[in-house]
Image (tube, rainbow, N blue to C red):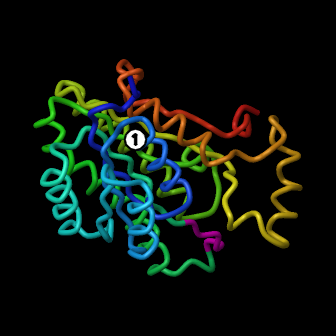
Amino acid sequence: MARLEGKVAIITGAAQGMGASHARIFIAQGAQVVLTDLNEEKGQALASELGSNALFVQQDVTREADWVRVVRATEDRFGPVDVLVNNAGITMSKTLAETSLDDYRRILEINQVSVFLGMKLVIPSMKKAGGGSIVNISSINGLVGGAIGYTDSKFAVRGMTKAAALECAADGIRVNSVHPGVIETPMISQGDTKSAVDEFAKHIPIGRVAKSEEVSNLVLYLASDESSYSTGSEFVVDGGLTAR
């Protein structure tokens, strides 16, 4: 039997990158998946590729009204939500002095507030389903320091995960965070960036960056019933970077 057979999932930021990887493996393992993203063209194309068990809904994850619309569309098409993957996020590498208030608020809205809204609006649907699993994508910068704004937001995701896990345990809803290190994507595989990443990879204990599928396999585990006794925890996939 497929590992997510009969489960209904929402994955944000799913038009490309890690989100698309999560969507592909969820579909392959029997889930019905609603993919959300601002990028309508890529999102619709991926949903068409994945077939009738996939639905794309354009979404701004910082808007509460969009979350209400996404949950309603999911229930109308597939039924109550069993799994939420809060994957949407952005990076920012400005210094503290260079970061404007607008910059700071933008990254918090997308990386942090969206996770709050997703959990808040999906939990009632999960209660209808009799329980569920929420997977919040943080970062190794939710464990150790990095760029201002990005680090702050990813530490917040880690904390919100623990608070929500405690609150939701009695309802059979598990909440965990995933903390990826450096992930191989098209953006880091070109030109000067590729050279810099290749050099950095020498400092990763495993000796290479991760493939998106290696993160997706962990997300799959947390979405499935195999992780039924795991909640409020951090799951790190970084090749040993934070083990030092």
Give the amino acid at mark 1: Val
Residue drawn at point x = 78 percent, y = 69 percent: 190
Task: Give the position of the N terminus as an image quadrant.
Answer: top left
The region drawn magenta spans 91-96
Q: Position of residue 147 (x, y in %)?
A: 63, 62
Quadrant of residue 231 in the image? Answer: top left
Position of 185 with respect to 21 (left or right) is right
Characterize the local packing of mark 1: few (<14), some (14-19) or many (20 or more) Cα atoms within 10 angstroms. many
* Left or right of 194, for residue 8: left
Q: Is residue 53 above or below residue 47?
A: above
Task: State yes or no: residue 93 in magenta.
Answer: yes
Q: What is the secondary structure assignment of the residue under circle 1?
A: strand
Circle 1 sits on which residue?
A: 135
- Relative to 122, residue 197 above or below: below
Residue 64, given in percent of the width and then of the height, sits at 21, 66
Image position, residue 205 (x, y; %):
82, 35
Q: Is residue 217 magenta?
A: no
Query: Quick one: 232 or 15, which is closer to the camera?
Result: 15
181 versus 98 height, above or below: above
Q: Residue at x 84, y 40 (%)?
A: 207
Q: Is residue 76 above or below residue 36?
A: above
Query: Relative to 177, is 166 on the left or the right?
Result: left
Q: Picture coordinates of residue 235 (x, y %)?
A: 53, 33
Question: Observer-nearest residue: 66 or 217?
Answer: 217
